[in-house]
Structures are given as C-alpha cells and as structure tokens.
Amino acid sequence: MQRLDELGLTYELSFGIDGRAGLSPELEARIDRVAADRRRLRPLTDAEFACSMSHRKIYETIIARNEPGCIVLEDDAQVGPAFAAFVHSGAYAEFPMLLLDYGAAYVWRTPVPLGPGLVAHRLAQTPDLATGYTLDRTAAQALLRATDPVCNVADWPLPLEDLGAALVMPRLVGHPEKGVLSNIDAARLILEAQRRSKPRTRYLTTAYWRRFWAKKRALRLRDGPAQTG
C-alpha cells in the first residue's frame, strides 16, 4: 500500500480469505475437493482454496457493482513508476485481460504495441502467477463461472487464451525472489509428494493436442526481470 501511495495511485483493499486454520462449513460448501484432486492430480491445500476464493471475491465485486473491470495486485506484488504510467495510460482497456506478472509462458509471435516500451503478446498457453493482472467485466464473468464451485488454484481456473488474454512485456509487476516461501507454497510442498502421474488417456483428448501444437508454433518467454525500480 505504501508503494501505491508513493506512486499516487488510488486503490481499494479486498481482504483475502485465510485458510491456514482450515475452512468453515460455509466455505467448504463453495469448493469441490474431489474435482480439484482430479484436475491437479493431488489434493489442494486449504490455503490454495482460500487464495482461489479470495480472487473470486474480486470477480464477484466487479459483477455486483457493474464495474468495467479492475487491476488486481496480490499483497506481495512489487510495482514501480512503469506500472503507474501504464495505469494512467489506460492501455489495459485494449484487452479483456492482461497479465502483468507471469512465469515462463508460450505466446503468439506477433506483438501488439501498448505504449512507449511496452508490447502485449496474446497467450498461446496459460502461464502461472496471479500476482498482478487486469481484467474487464467479461473476463470477470468467465472466471466467476469457472470458480463455481472452486476446484482449482487461483492461477488459473480456466485457459486464459480462451478469453483472448495477453501478457505485457516487459513485466510491470514483480514478485518475491525464489526461495522465499509463502504460506501457500509451504503447504503445497507437503502435498506435492502425493502428486500422481498424468494419465495416459490425456493423449486421447482434443485439449492435449491443442496444447501440444500451440507449444510447437508459439514463442516461449522466460520469467525475466520486472520494471519495478
């Protein structure tokens, strides 16, 4: 918050759900543990479910208020003057969703100019990380439908390429250095040992081959430095 104040940006806090001590019966009713286990090939932690529901609260707020959209920053997001300039430019309105932070990603090769020194690449496959992103009301509606019930991690409950989402280069939002474990990461590591092998039947699905050929045709972008200074 202090950094946003320093950059002269207005914001609203959306308090997340804390799942470290377990989920209440009310929250349990909004998740599907069996479907989550099937999709992730391991159990999801309560903290992961809580994180997903925290993002879902934001989607619900956009729809309930009939807002055109918003920019979402997680509590550990790192931003700088380049992010502030992007916000003031309004360039985010050109896409239904823009990832401002992301892990290694596959994108289509033709960039779209967003402003001085910035381009957008449409996603060929959905990368990890939900540290910072923009979304309009249409994208919020799709994400809301995909999280009813919650049965996946926050990043992401559906293929973002289906929404026409793109990522911004260079990254405008940073995240803590590798090796700094969040509460979610620490709990996830324990359950990773239970991860099952991917079923061979995936080779018989259209979705698998669509992803396979997208990787072959797309450009791979690695997780480079963010403009947070």
Image: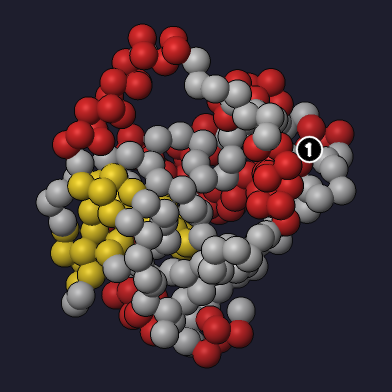
Q: From the viewer's perspective, is residue 168 above or below residue 48?
A: below
Q: Where is residue 53 in the image (x, y as percent from the top left)?
A: 66, 44
Q: Where is residue 189 in the image (x, y as percent from the top left)?
A: 68, 45
State whether residue 192 appears in this view.
Answer: yes
Q: At x 60% / y 63%, what residue is drawn?
A: 179
The quarter of the displayed image where residue 168 is located: bottom left
Q: Position of residue 229 (x, y in %)?
A: 41, 85
The residue singled out by tag 1 in the image is: 27
Type of amino acid under label 1? Leu
Q: At x 49% / y 81%, what residue is drawn?
A: 9
Q: From the viewer's perspective, is residue 39 above or below residue 139?
A: above
Q: Is residue 152 or residue 215 the one in the foreground?
A: 215
Label 1 packing within 10 angstroms: few (<14), some (14-19), many (20+): some
Instruction: Judge from the rendering whether residue 215 lies leftward or rightward of residue 12; answer left or right.
Output: left
Q: Is residue 43 or residue 9 the one in the foreground?
A: 43
Which residue reaches farthest left?
Answer: 110
Work out which quarter of the rendered image holds the N terminus and state it. bottom right
Q: At x 50% / y 15%, what residue is drawn?
A: 199
